[in-house]
Image: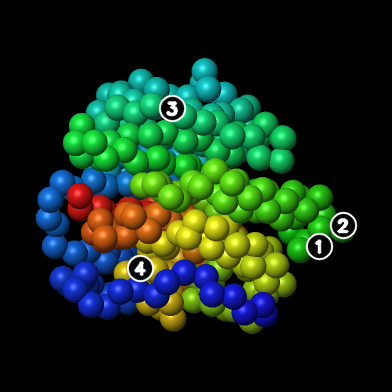
Amino acid sequence: MIERPFFSPPDPVGRVAWRLRPSWKTWSIPWLVVELGVQFTLATWNINSVRLRINLVSRFLEEHAPDVLCLQETKCRDSEFPLAAFHKLGYPHVAINGQKGYHGVAVASKLPFDLIDRRSFCDKGDARHIAVTLSPTQGEGRPLTLHNFYVPAGGDEPDPDINPKFAHKLAFLDEMAEWVTSHQIAKTDAVIAGDLNIAPMEADVWNHKALLRVVSHTPVEVEKLGLVAEAGPWVDAMRHYVAQDEKLYTWWSYRAHDWAKSDRGRRLDHVWVSESLKPSLGGVRVVRESRGWERPSDHVPVIVHFNF
């Protein structure tokens, strides 16, 4: 496997006031700290069809009430997005980049924002990115730019010469790294959130050796995602609190007869923050129980807390 430093390890000193580390067979898994200052919460979730699972989105928003929710795989045109449901739930500000039946990203927010970008990577126009800028402190002069991504899955065969989907994924990551560098994306308060479709660390998959030839954990994917991370540089908000050798998953296959018992997961969903936001991190939560809801997504939400 290609050896490449990925993210900084968790800071063990002074940040974590208390930490809950239950068995990975349990449901909700929070790593939280004492809340100080202005609290702001950001969630990301590959919903696998927002119209089909709007009831699950509603349940999540009612139970957890993040300030901002990033969605991936919305799978609908902009005109078909269920705006009324989000408005009713207290999210009047929604930015959408969708298309019929595939892909699609959206940002729903309690706070007003400015839409700044819908970038088309690899010139495909396939609705994989949307960016907004907002003020978590609501007018106190600290704008934050949020980039919501759905990176290509890459198909089944990890060979770009015979699998155009995998070739597209690698090209997407190359362009993403160049974009972060050339536009200095992480030089101000910025966040990348979403389904990046790569589990980069050994503890991000249920069996490292078995998955080295499986798309999402191959060395070439890990290397290229590492280059995106280094281009910031970005801080992995989840691994800031969870040690790199601890298992951490956000996705479980629909193919599993009993997903919870077998627990063959992968961490495909990520939240990265610019170095300037690292001191404001306040905790993370993986909402594992949502994988057991009726007609679930195969991904679960990730919530990141900030204290400004």
Task: Describe residue 200's horizontal placement relative to residue 223 as left or right.
Answer: left
Residue at mark 1 to residue at mark 3: CA–CA distance: 36 Å
The residue at the point 55 percent across, 58 percent down is 231
Q: Which residue is mark 4?
A: 240
Callout 1 amino acid = Asp
Residue at mark 3 to residue at mark 4: CA–CA distance: 29 Å
The residue at the point 40 percent across, 40 percent down is 145
Do the residues under discs 3 and 2 have CB atoms within 8 angstroms? no
Q: Nearer the viewer, residue 49 or 138?
A: 138
Q: Position of residue 33 (x, y in %)?
A: 19, 64
Mark earlier in primary sequence (3, 4): 3
Do the residues under discs 2 and 1 have CB atoms within 8 angstroms? yes
Q: Secondary structure at mark 1?
A: loop
Callout 2 amino acid = Ile
Residue 162: mark in rendering? 2
Callout 3 amino acid = Leu
Comparing labels 1 and 3, the label whose residue is closer to the camera: 3
Residue at mark 3 to residue at mark 2: CA–CA distance: 38 Å
Q: Secondary structure at mark 2?
A: loop
Residue 234 position by quadrant: bottom left
Q: Position of residue 1 (x, y in %)?
A: 67, 80
Do the residues under discs 1 and 3 have CB atoms within 8 angstroms? no
The crowding category of the residue bearing disc 4, from other C-alpha atoms within 10 Å (few below 14, some 14 to 19, many at least 20), is many
Q: Which residue is mark 3?
A: 115
Q: Nearer the viewer, residue 302 or 227?
A: 227
Q: Which residue is mark 1?
A: 159
Residue 308: mark in rendering? none
